[in-house]
Image (spheres, helix red, strand yellow):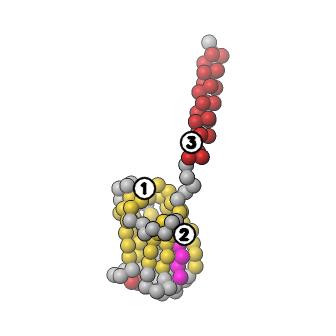
Amino acid sequence: MARTILLVAATAAAALVGALALALPGQAATPRLVASVGPGDTITLRTATGARVRNLRAGVYTVTVRDRSGEHNFRISGPGVRKATGVGSTGTVTWKVRLARGKVYRFVCDPHSDDMRGSFRTR
Ligand SMILES: [Cu+2]
């Protein structure tokens, strides 16, 4: 009896492993977003294909930030996310962010927040 239960458990575990192996290839790698600020008075957040981000599925994203100006910075904030580059510095950084469902996230250049800003929603 105990042996039968063990066999059933082992079979179930093998089936689960098989199902996971099948599911994994279908899971895309962590989607990537590209944020950019400067050198002019522009700030953008785009998908990997270059489309402006207006609406995103909730989940984990990699954000590559290209800060190209010592006068601007890139800050993103919203539920669970608070990240920013420095105003006086330039360079490229990569962040991993987890976006919650049904929220609004905002990005902004702190010294020029009246003009240089944007937002998107999650679903
Ligand atoms: Cu700015």
For the record, the magenta segment spans: 64-68
Residue 19, percent from left and from top:
58, 36
Q: Quadrant of the N terminus?
A: top right
Q: Which residue is mark 1?
A: 57
Q: Could you tell which of marks 1 and 3 lies nearer the N-terminus?
A: 3
Q: Amino acid at mark 1?
A: Arg
Three-letter amino acid code at the position of disc 2? Thr
The image shows residue 98, relative to residue 65, as above or below, that is above
Res. 83 in view: no
Q: Residues within 10 Å of mark 2 (few under 14, many from 20)?
A: some
Q: Looking at mark 3, is its residue's CB closer than 8 Å to ligand 1?
A: no
Q: Secondary structure at mark 3?
A: helix
Q: Nearer the viewer, mark 3 or mark 2?
A: 3
The CA distance from mark 1 to mark 2 is 18 Å
The answer to which quarter of the image holds residue 103 is bottom left
Residue indicated by mark 3: 23
